[in-house]
Image (spheres, rainbow, N blue to C red):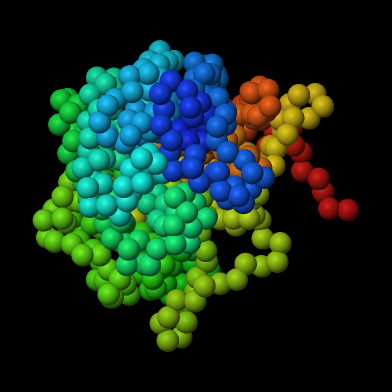
Amino acid sequence: MFAKDFIWGAAASAQQIEGAVSVDGRGLSIWDVFAEREGAIAGGDCADVACDHYHRAADDVALMQRIGLQAYRFSIAWPRVLPEGVGQVNDAGLAFYDRVVDACLAAGITPFATMFHWDLPQALQDRGGWSHPDSPAWFVEFCVKVVSRLGDRVTNWITLNEPQVHFHHGHLIGNHAPGLQLPLADVLQAGHHMLLAHGKGVAAIRETAGRPVQVGYAPVGCVCLPESIKSEDIVAARDGTLGMHDENIFNNIWWMDPIFGRGYPEDGLRVYGDNAPKFTDADLDIISEPIDFLGLNIYQGHRVRAADDGEIIKSRWEPGHMSTAMHWPVTPEVLYWGPRWISERYQVPIYITENGLANLDWPALDGRVRDPQRIDFMQRYLLELNKAIGDGADVRGYFYWSILDNFEWAEGYRPRFGLIHVDYLTQRRTLKDSALWYHKVIASHGAVLSDMLIEDHPQVQDA
């Protein structure tokens, strides 16, 4: 099964779990302001309290230790550290992350810190946000301030989380913060600024740390799946995964090729046409600052087949196909094909930095949270990931999303992704069955995944 040094972890983000949005000098984020719009968040929810992780971090890390996590991926809230986005540092904000890091290290959990997980300070959005050409410099200042404080203990850093989601939902169609509906050309120019911020951020993190560190980047892994095992369908799925055929922002190579020194892909320049951003060769040099690993956030894929004329046709799901509470199809094979093809293209170590199931979980009358669907989901996906590793994909670790039920952006608090159930009224935490099962997976280095039945859930025979 998985190698002994394979890293087993879980992930979260600041905006989704911390709460305490007006506590100890934190500034407003774009999500705090966006949530004030009528109808922006399902149920009128907001992240003002969320999981109150700001006040409960030590207890939450103790729960992570009970699960046996070897690593915890969290994000640094930019407005908690720099309330105005730049300038005066909020020492109380950095002190909170001191406590998180120290608690992890004391528990034997390796911290993976993400610098930007969508919570831009509203003060910077008021100045233009990622559309402003100074935004890369703002990000560098943020990185320097954080790494100066935490870099003596944190050795694993991630610059950016899912630019595809942030720009499609937040800047193009407007159903995520900051709620903009910009022309595609403006969205892609802002995306270019973010990629510049990544490259400059990588250099700043290394220089500021002053010691060897591992720096990565975590985009969405957008995966096409072959409808059949026919060679032409496999080729079509690979071409769909590693190509661009329309103006959709959800693709891999526009957001990954420049990172690895390939420049913007010709496919992308062709389909974006006049909407492509303005850039220079010097920009591409900055963006391609070498990184140590690629994080992939992979939840789902879509199936495709090859047409007689060589075109790629998206397949329809059969009625009743497995789906999550987010209405995402359950497609375990994405953790086979995605890591395999992306690893082949970029020849870089990979971590699955997010993968998980949104469910509608609640405590039973006996207090136990039974979530067999999540266990089944994880088992299916991890078995596929193990196959990918066996076929040559250089995957070093897996982070389940999420450690806690949390504020699921525009969906509010209804979908529950957590290994740990959170009662949002009392803040009571309950380890779900999936958390206890994951403990066994970690302790066995994945060996229990080969068990075909879920404990305490016997199969029911057809009548």
Q: Is residue 364 left or right of residue 387?
A: right
- Relative height, residue 184 to residue 370 (above, below): below
Residue 30 placement (x, y as % from top left): 44, 43
Residue at 55%, 35% (x, y): give it.
47
Residue 142 placement (x, y as % from top left): 27, 34
Q: Is residue 198 left or right of residue 240?
A: left
- Relative height, residue 69 to residue 1 (above, below): above
Whether residue 303 is visible, yes or no, is yes
Report how many numbered discs are placed on residues in the image: 0
- Relative height, residue 149 to residue 43 (above, below): above
For residue 121, which quarter of the picture? top left
Q: Is residue 262 left or right of residue 37?
A: left
For residue 158, which quarter of the picture? top left
For residue 8, which quarter of the picture? top left
Give the residue at the far right of this rendering.
463
Residue 416 placement (x, y as % from top left): 63, 39
Give the residue at the far top of this rendering.
106
Residue at 40%, 63% (x, y): give it.
182
Give the residue at the far left of this rendering.
282
Whether residue 403 is visible, yes or no, is no
Residue at 21%, 65% (x, y): give it.
278
- Relative height, residue 23 to residue 116 (above, below): above
Residue at 49%, 42% (x, y): give it.
33
Residue 133 placement (x, y as % from top left): 22, 52
Towards the viewer: 455 or 34: 34
